[in-house]
Amino acid sequence: MRTGISLTMALVLFGGCAYLAPRERVAGPAVDGDGAVVFTFYAPAATRVQLAGDWPENNWARGDGSAGEADIGLMSDDGNGLWTIAVHLDPGRYRYLFWVDEARWHLDPGNPEDVAGGLAGRASLLTLFRRGGRLEIR
């Protein structure tokens, strides 16, 4: 009985702490006023974050062709761990991931859509279409 009470107290304590801990919530991709898709990723401990996707100019962060440019999809850090990049894309379906410190692949936590494929086995999915001349995300 004591074990059950202790376990319940531990769950309440740790669950409460996790609930109160500050969290950075980042939205999924958004279209900016220039018609570019802005990708954001929160990684305060990262020193480098790249957007890798299956559109030709990115080619999973290898660039157009087989040149293997190291800075394809390199995102900018705002100094507080919020990484961003704006990319001009045509309407279509695109798979993408975030490549953190050249060591770990991450799905987009702000985008619930994902599919099989990509370099990590699954990839976030972005669907773009035009409505009234404006690029929108489905």
Image: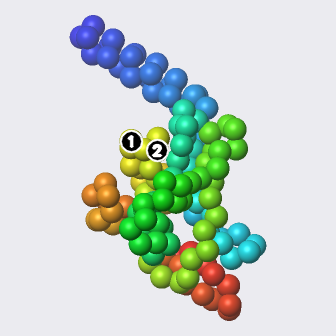
- Residue 21: x and y in percent read 57, 28
Relative to 54, does residue 85 appear above or below in the rendering?
Answer: above
Relative to 69, does residue 88 appear above or below in the rendering?
Answer: below
Residue plotted at (38% across, 68% down) = 66
Badge 2 element = strand
Residue wearing tag 1: 103
Which residue is at the far front?
67
- Residue 31: x and y in percent read 65, 71
Neighbour tally class for label 1: few under 14, some 14-19, many 20 plus, Cα within 10 Å: few
Badge 1 amino acid: Ala
Q: Is residue 115 visible?
A: yes
CA–CA distance in space, label 1 to label 2: 6 Å
Neighbour tally class for label 2: few under 14, some 14-19, many 20 plus, Cα within 10 Å: some
Residue plotted at (33% across, 62% down) = 118
Q: How many marks?
A: 2
Please state if 96 lies on the left or on the right of 43 as rendered: left
